[in-house]
Image: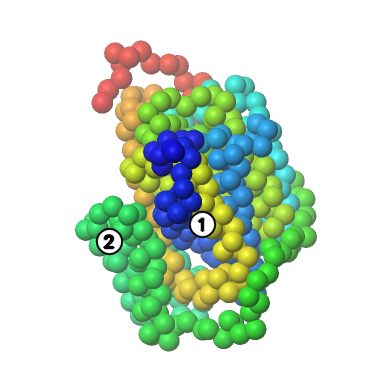
């Protein structure tokens, strides 16, 4: 009989389920939050929003199973948990509000195929994404998500009670609960700090009369996922913009795969494993687009959980993936989750997005503070974050350039970091300062 601390150990089901559930609980809130925020901004009706949450849970479960048990060269055979990515959120909101959900889904489908194909040939492109480039991109992602968390904290941009005292109270209590649980708890409870904050904030919002349960009436007990809730439209500008972010997402997946191998498996990641994990990222994201969801990616919090607990058994983690799929078949779950007020999500996401930003800082420190790295990081972030905050700066460029870069700081940061990394001369070791 195997152990939960072995990759391929044969573990009894009764022993495997709790550890699988732990991984689900660690990523559950982060997995459903992007589609909830997108649905709110895009004005998607409650019924469709609930169906999308169902689909998100199912897609995350499928993606995790493919990573654990590969299909051909798609999947790394590593204990990686997949879920809906925050990386695409800001661009997805922009495309959905200006061109519609159909254009967004078309871009997600095509972009996923591009990333999946790239994952099949990792030797030809992995050298472009150095540790400095990846660290710069992750830092930019953290910064770009902060305004989204702030808008949600205030009640959701465009809502009638935006910035109201009720939203401030609920958001603050949620955030404080997440913080106190993270600081003073230990073990599994600490890894569930975001979920605990969400529960406390939700209960408070119910007591304050901020939750409407009327939409739970006449909800089916069991329902299959809704296929193609939005008819895909294939627009070149949206596709190119999404592909840029897919490349960014690939760097995150590579970073998570590397961190998992070094931290939990105590070895270096192979080029094949990097490519296979990215291929899963891409091809399953295409499936996500067919079900109205934004792309998936590996979840860093689950990598951290595996590194901390050393639970790497594929079967144990697969039980969690199956739980996600089963949960997605019950519409009442998705409908209930749509009743969570934006202020509660804002209090939770501030903690999540802050951790992404901190992870970027950690990667920057690991990459080193040489003069060359300072130029790559400083200039990429300055141009990417600065130029995209200046309305009209890209007005003289063609429409396609505006769509790809004008409101997408992550794409600008990624492109500039890669170019600078290629053209700047390499430094000698004795020139590196700390």
Evaluate whether residue 40 shows in this view.
Answer: no
Around disc 1, counting alpha carbons within 10 Å, would you say few (fewer than 14), some (14 to 19), or many (20 or more)?
many
**Who comes first in sequence, dot 2 or dot 1?**
1
- Determine which quarter of the picture holds residue 331: bottom right
Figure check: 418 above or below 359: above
Q: Which residue is mark 1?
A: 31
Pick the residue in front: 226 or 390.
Answer: 226
Image location (x, y in percent) of residue 125: 59, 25
Mark 1: which secondary structure? helix
Around disc 2, counting alpha carbons within 10 Å, would you say few (fewer than 14), some (14 to 19), or many (20 or more)?
some
Task: Say left or right for 147 vs 274.
Answer: left
Pick the residue in front: 347 or 300.
Answer: 300
Task: Say left or right for 240 vs 1.
Answer: right
Q: Quadrant of the C terminus?
A: top left
In the drawing, what numbered circle is on residue 254? none
Figure check: 254 above or below 433: below
Q: Residue at x 33, y 24 (%)?
A: 370
Figure check: 356 above or below 162: above
Task: Say left or right for 431 vs 11.
Answer: left
Pick the residue in front: 279 or 409.
Answer: 279
Q: Residue at x 38, y 78 (%)?
A: 203
Q: Residue at x 51, y 28 (%)?
A: 129
Q: Which residue is mark 2?
A: 181
Mark 2: which secondary structure? helix
């Amino acid at each position: 009989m195997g152990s939960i601390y072995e990759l391929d150990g044969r573990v009894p089901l009764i022993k495997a389920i709790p550890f699988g559930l732990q991984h689900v609980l660690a990523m559950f809130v982060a997995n459903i939050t992007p589609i909830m925020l997108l649905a709110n901004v895009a004005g998607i009706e409650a019924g469709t929003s609930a169906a999308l949450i169902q689909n998100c849970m199912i897609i995350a479960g499928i993606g995790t199973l493919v990573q654990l048990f590969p299909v051909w060269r798609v999947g790394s055979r590593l204990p990686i948990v997949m879920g809906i990515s925050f990386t695409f959120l800001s661009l997805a909101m922009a495309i959905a509000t200006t061109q519609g959900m159909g254009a967004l889904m078309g871009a997600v489908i095509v972009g996923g195929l591009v990333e999946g194909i790239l994952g099949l040939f990792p030797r030809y492109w992995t050298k472009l994404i150095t540790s400095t480039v990846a660290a710069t991109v992750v830092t930019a992602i953290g910064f770009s998500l902060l305004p989204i968390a702030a808008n949600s904290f205030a009640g959701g941009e465009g809502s009638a009670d935006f910035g109201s005292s009720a939203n401030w109270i609920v958001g603050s209590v949620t955030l404080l609960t997440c913080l106190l649980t993270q600081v003073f708890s230990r073990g599994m409870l600490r890894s569930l700090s975001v979920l605990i904050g969400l529960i406390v904030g939700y209960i408070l919002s119910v007591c304050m009369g901020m939750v409407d349960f009327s939409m739970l009436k006449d909800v089916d007990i069991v329902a299959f996922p809704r296929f193609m809730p939005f008819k895909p439209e294939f627009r070149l500008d949206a596709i190119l913009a999404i592909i840029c972010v897919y490349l960014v997402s690939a760097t995150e997946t590579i970073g998570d795969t590397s961190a998992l191998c070094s931290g939990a498996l105590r070895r270096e990641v192979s080029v094949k494993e990097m490519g296979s994990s990215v291929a899963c990222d891409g091809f399953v994201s295409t499936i996500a687009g067919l079900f109205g969801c934004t792309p998936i990616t590996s979840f860093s919090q689950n990598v951290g959980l595996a590194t901390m607990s050393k639970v790497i058994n594929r079967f144990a983690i697969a039980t969690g993936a199956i739980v996600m799929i089963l949960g997605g078949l019950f519409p009442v779950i998705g409908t209930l989750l749509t009743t969570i007020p934006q202020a509660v999500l804002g209090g939770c996401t501030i903690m999540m997005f802050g951790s992404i930003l901190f992870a970027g800082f950690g990667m920057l420190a690991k990459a080193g503070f040489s003069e060359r790295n300072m130029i790559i990081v400083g200039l990429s972030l300055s141009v990417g974050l600065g130029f995209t905050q200046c309305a009209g700066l890209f007005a003289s460029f063609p429409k396609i350039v505006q769509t790809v870069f004008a409101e997408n700081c992550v794409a600008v940061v990624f492109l500039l970091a890669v170019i600078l990394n290629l053209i700047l001369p390499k430094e000698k070791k004795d020139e590196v300062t700390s």
